[in-house]
Amino acid sequence: MGDNGHVYLTRARLVELEQQLRELKIKGRTEMAQKIAEARGYGDLSENAEYEAAKEEQQHLELRIQKLEETLSRARIIESSELPNDKVYILTLVKLKDMKTKETIEYRLVSPEEADFEKNKISITSPIGKSLMGKKAGELVKIKVPAGFLEYKILEISR
């Protein structure tokens, strides 16, 4: 999230979130209405566990919809081509060398809403992301993480 309440997203992630929202509103709400109607058919609502579970599930669905709408209302599209290439910024692809294991890893720095560790997309608000922001190729970075300290050398910065 930005300093002014904005959520910075790539165009692809914005489209993805809009699609999720449409699906939840149309398909999700329709399925939920069917579940509630089906549960109602089981009789006395005061002792109907299926009805209670369906109503609770409906609340969770509405919360997800509300959170997505709120995120999208604050979304600003960010294009990597608009950002400088001299330092680590959001959307930067950073090639790092772990000074302990000598392994090389690559991370793309993204907004918290786009972070996906399995795809090597790390948030600019994570300990690693925060420590890399503003650094240049060739710099050594020591990062405090819950397990101790990591030390990386920034080998390359690209978009």
Image (cartoon, rainbow, N blue to C red):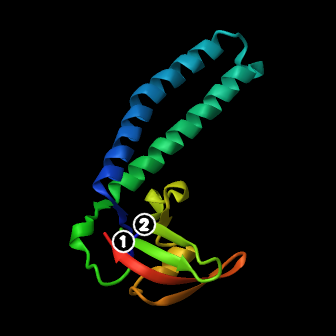
Q: Name the residue under label 2.
A: 108
Q: Residue at x 36, y 45 (%)?
A: 16
Q: Residue 58 carries which label?
A: none
- Residue 84 position (above or below residue 70): below
Real-space CA distance between mark 1 and mark 2, rounded to the nearest whole angstrom: 6 Å
In terms of depth relative to the viewer, which is nearer, 22 or 97?
97
- Residue 100 position (above or below residue 57): below
Q: What element carries label 2?
A: strand
Query: How many residues crowd mark 1 within 10 Å: few (<14), some (14–19), many (20+)?
Result: many
Query: What residue type is disc 1 on?
Result: Thr
User: Of marks 1 and 2, which one's residue comes earlier in the chain?
Assistant: 1
Q: In the image, is 92 to the left or to the right of 38?
A: left
Pointers 1 and 2 in contact (CB under 8 A)?
yes
Q: Which residue is drawn at 58% across and 19% down?
A: 35
Which residue is situated farthest in the bottom direction here? 139
Which residue is situated farthest in the right direction here? 47
Q: Position of residue 98 (x, y in %)?
A: 58, 78
Q: Mark 1 points at which residue?
A: 92
Q: Where is residue 90 in the image (x, y as percent from the top left)?
A: 37, 72
Query: What residue type is disc 2 on?
Result: Arg
Query: How many residues crowd mark 2 within 10 Å: few (<14), some (14–19), many (20+)?
Result: many
In terms of depth relative to the viewer, which is nearer, 108 or 16?
108
In the rendered image, which quarter is residue 89 located in? bottom left
